[in-house]
Each structure stands twice: as structure tokens, then as C-alpha cells.
Image (spheres, rainbow, N blue to C red):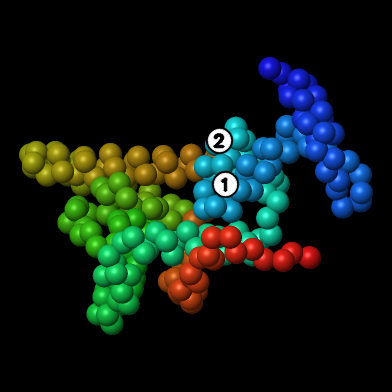
């Protein structure tokens, strides 16, 4: 059954119903209108908009958002209701207020992420797995402004490798070579980022949480009057 056939059947069905629009004209319904109604009802019912976009076959969220016949405050209210329902199913301990010590530890974690070459990207609550040998660490996020410093480190590592080889310190050569390879890889990736035109990282500072707790969801069948 093609789209034209479905559209013709819908026209016949609506003509039999005798329904009129606000202007008093016969109400028209198109197959495409059902996609819009589905998207609106699905997202208003708590379905994440990116999931709705995938179901509808949209390549961008902008297309899906244009489908939504819902006001922005309705989307926010629905999303908060979704969070409220999700939280009600979880243990209350997970949403308790953090103690002063826990909050202090959280802030110190982000303060300690700043290193000489950039930012340490390790997740909160995880220790440093590389004994603070940042040049070897894969989660080190290099600051593009430290490019010259990284080049100096690479040159220094090469000089230390030559010295170690000249003195027969083969064990030290192996460790220095690991650091040199890691530093060279970081320098090359930094160069690719500049060449590709990707934006440089921006320090957003510490987050401040001021949003109040979401209101409870509306009761089933409760509707609001829209202008």
C-alpha cells in the first residue's frame, strides 16, 4: 500500500465523519501528520528526542524538533517528570545531599586535574594509574598552548636516551623510550587537531548546581489549556 492510497483512504474516512476544523472547513488529515502526532505524543510521554529521531529516520535532531507540536515548557516539564519517575525507582540514598567532606573531595578532584601540559581526564573517584607520569597517560588532554613545552620534553627525552645508551643503562633506555613514544604520539595528535580546524579546549570552571528538584508529574488525564 503506497502513500497515495493511504492518503485517499484518509480523505474518504474524514469525509464520512463530517469533522470540521476551527475555520469550519472539512478536517483534513495526511499520512505525514501521523508522524508529527507520533513524535509529539512519544516525546511528551517521556521518550528522549534522540530516540524519536532514530525511529523516524531523521539524520539530525533539528528535523525531529520541528515535528514536535509541543511548547518548550511542556518539554521541560515532561522531562522533569521523567526524571522524577526514574528517581522514585532508585534507592533514596543515591539522591541524598552530599556531606561537606564529600563535596570538598569532589571539588579537589577537578582542581587536581590541572597539570603542566594540560588537563588530566581521569574520572572522579579514580586514582592515578601511571604514578603521575602524565606524559605516558592516555587520558592527558594536552593544552595547545603547551605545544612548545611538549617539544622541549621530547628533545630532552632524546638526549637522555642517548646518554643512557652511551653509559649502558639499558633498563633506563627502555623506560625513556616509552615516554618518548607517548610524547610523540600526543604531539602528532595535537598537530592533527590544529590541521583539522577543531576548536581548542575551553576551561568551563567548576559547575554550580542551582536547579531545584523537579516537580511531580501530572496526574493521568490532566491537561492544560493552551492559548
Name above or below for residue 150 compared with residue 87.
above
Side of 89 where 196 appears, left or right:
right
- Nearer the observer, 178 or 105: 105
The crowding category of the residue bearing disc 2, from other C-alpha atoms within 10 Å (few below 14, some 14 to 19, many at least 20), is few
Q: Quadrant of the C terminus?
A: bottom right
Q: Which residue is mark 2?
A: 55
Q: Position of residue 99 (x, y in %)?
A: 27, 80
User: From the image, which quarter does the N terminus lie in?
Assistant: top right
Residues at discs 2 and 1 in contact (Cβ within 8 Å): yes
Regarding residue 132, the answer to whether it shows in the image is no
**Image mark count:** 2
With 202 as the anchor, is 225 left or right in this view?
Answer: right
Question: Where does the image place residue 33, in percent across and percent down from the top left?
Answer: 73, 38
* For discs 2 and 1, the disc positioned in front in the rendered view: 1
Q: Compute the Cα span from label 2 to label 1.
A: 11 Å
Label 2's element?
A: helix
Q: Which mark is residue 42?
A: 1
Above-or-below relation of 101 to 116: below
Asked whether 50 or 166 is in front, the reply is 50
Q: What residue occupies the far bottom of the structure in this picture?
A: 100
Residue 154 in sight here:
yes
Q: Which badge, 2 or 1, comes first in the chain's sequence? A: 1
Q: Nearer the viewer, residue 135 or 54?
A: 54
**Residue at the (19%, 52%) spot, across then down:** 130
Q: Residue furthest top?
A: 1
Name the residue: 46% across, 73% down: 213
Q: Name the residue rendered at 39%, 59% in the picture.
A: 86
Left or right side of 59 for 26: right
Q: Position of residue 218 (x, y in %)?
A: 54, 66
How many neighbours does mark 1 have within 10 angstroms: few (below 14), some (14-19), or many (20 or more)?
A: some
Amino acid at each position: 500500500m503506497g502513500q497515495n492510497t493511504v492518503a485517499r483512504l484518509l480523505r474518504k474516512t474524514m469525509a464520512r465523519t463530517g469533522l470540521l476544523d476551527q475555520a469550519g472547513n472539512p478536517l483534513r488529515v495526511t499520512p505525514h501528520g501521523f508522524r508529527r502526532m507520533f513524535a509529539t505524543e512519544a516525546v511528551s510521554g517521556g521518550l528522549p528526542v534522540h530516540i524519536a529521531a532514530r525511529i523516524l529516520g531523521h539524520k539530525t535532531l533539528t528535523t525531529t524538533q520541528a515535528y514536535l507540536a509541543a511548547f518548550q515548557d511542556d518539554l521541560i516539564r515532561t522531562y522533569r517528570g521523567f526524571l522524577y519517575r526514574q528517581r522514585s525507582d532508585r534507592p533514596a540514598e543515591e539522591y541524598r545531599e552530599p556531606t561537606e567532606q564529600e563535596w570538598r573531595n569532589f571539588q579537589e578532584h577537578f582542581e587536581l586535574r590541572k597539570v603542566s601540559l594540560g588537563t588530566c581526564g581521569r574520572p572522579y573517584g579514580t586514582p592515578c594509574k601511571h604514578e603521575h607520569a602524565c606524559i605516558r597517560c592516555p587520558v592527558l588532554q594536552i593544552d595547545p598552548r603547551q605545544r612548545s613545552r611538549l617539544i622541549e620534553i621530547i628533545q630532552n627525552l632524546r638526549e637522555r636516551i642517548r646518554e643512557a645508551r652511551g653509559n649502558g643503562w639499558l633498563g633506563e633506555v627502555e623506560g625513556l623510550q616509552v615516554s618518548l613514544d607517548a610524547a610523540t604520539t600526543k604531539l602528532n595528535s595535537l598537530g592533527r587537531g590544529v590541521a583539522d580546524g577543531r576548536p581548542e579546549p575551553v576551561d568551563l570552571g567548576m559547575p554550580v548546581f542551582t536547579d531545584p528538584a523537579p516537580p511531580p508529574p501530572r496526574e493521568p488525564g490532566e491537561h492544560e489549556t493552551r492559548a
